[in-house]
Amino acid sequence: MADIKSMKNSHFLSEEDLREEDLRQAIEMLFFAYRDFTGEPDSMLAEIGLGRAHHRAVYFVGRNAGIPVTELLAILKITKQSLSRVLSQLIAEGYIEQRTGVEDRRKRHLHLTAKGIELEHQLTANQRQRIAKAYKDAGPEAVRGFRHVLHGIMDSEDQWRFDVDGNVGSGGNGGGGPPATKATRR
């Protein structure tokens, strides 16, 4: 069985090349990275009576000003009831505002308020710094490889949202799905 650590120049690994220990280590590294990535924002949110679901809603509304509630539901993959509870609290506390659609008055579009923008910046400041440092330390080729790994882990229905083959930082529509719009680009 090949040692995954010695396969630096290989762009393809067969199943035989992937040892159980390497897979387990990747699972653990993802766990620890996610724990540390969310730790500071979780503490900040707890201080104001909010949680991780609120953070995700604030983040994606911030990234997609005017996002319809239905699209936010599709991104977060939570129930309408759960999102309703989260949005009700964020609206009541002045972080998000809801506007009726111009073309379709049945649609509700979400926007961060000034207070919501400030919260989103505070919550993601440490996360942006962590990613920037890791990217800088790893280098562009490792970043591209990391993006491909993350892309491969996510469900196929969301892969179209990301351009993993373009230049690092290029964003955009990565292939095959709905065209990238202001509301779908991440």
Image (cartoon, rainbow, N blue to C red):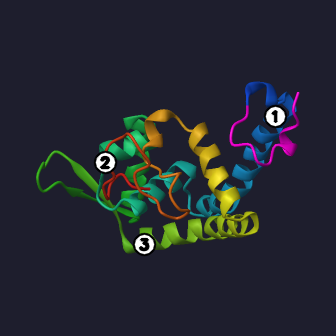
For mark 1, give the secondary structure.
Answer: helix
- Find the magenta span and give its range: 1-13
Residue at 76% x, 48% y: name it.
9
The percent coordinates of residue 104 (x first, y second) are 12, 48
Q: Is residue 7 above or below residue 64?
A: above
Label 3 – label 2 distance at C-alpha: 31 Å
**Are dots 3 and 1 in contact, CB under 8 Å?**
no
The percent coordinates of residue 170 (x first, y second) are 48, 63
Please indicate whether residue 90 sits to the left or right of residue 39 in the image: left
Q: Label for residue 115?
A: 3
| Residue marked by disc 1 | 24
**Are dots 3 and 2 in contact, CB under 8 Å?**
no
Amino acid identity at mark 2: Pro
Residue 5 is a magenta residue:
yes
| Residue marked by disc 2 | 179
Q: Quadrant of the N terminus?
A: top right
Crowd around label 3: few <14 · some 14–19 · many ≥20 (10 Å)? few
Q: Residue most toward the front?
A: 9
Label 1 – label 2 distance at C-alpha: 36 Å
Q: Is residue 10 above or below residue 126?
A: above
The percent coordinates of residue 49 (x first, y second) are 56, 57
The percent coordinates of residue 107 (x first, y second) are 20, 47
Which of marks 2 and 1 precedes in the sequence?
1
Image quadrant assignment for residue 125: bottom right
Nearer the viewer's eye, disc 3 or disc 1?
Answer: 1
Please indicate whether residue 185 sits to the left or right of residue 125 in the image: left
Residue at 87% x, 44% y: name it.
6
Q: Residue most toward the top?
A: 16
Nearer the viewer's eye, disc 1 or disc 2?
Answer: 2
Label 3 – label 1 distance at C-alpha: 41 Å
**Are dots 1 and 2 in contact, CB under 8 Å?**
no
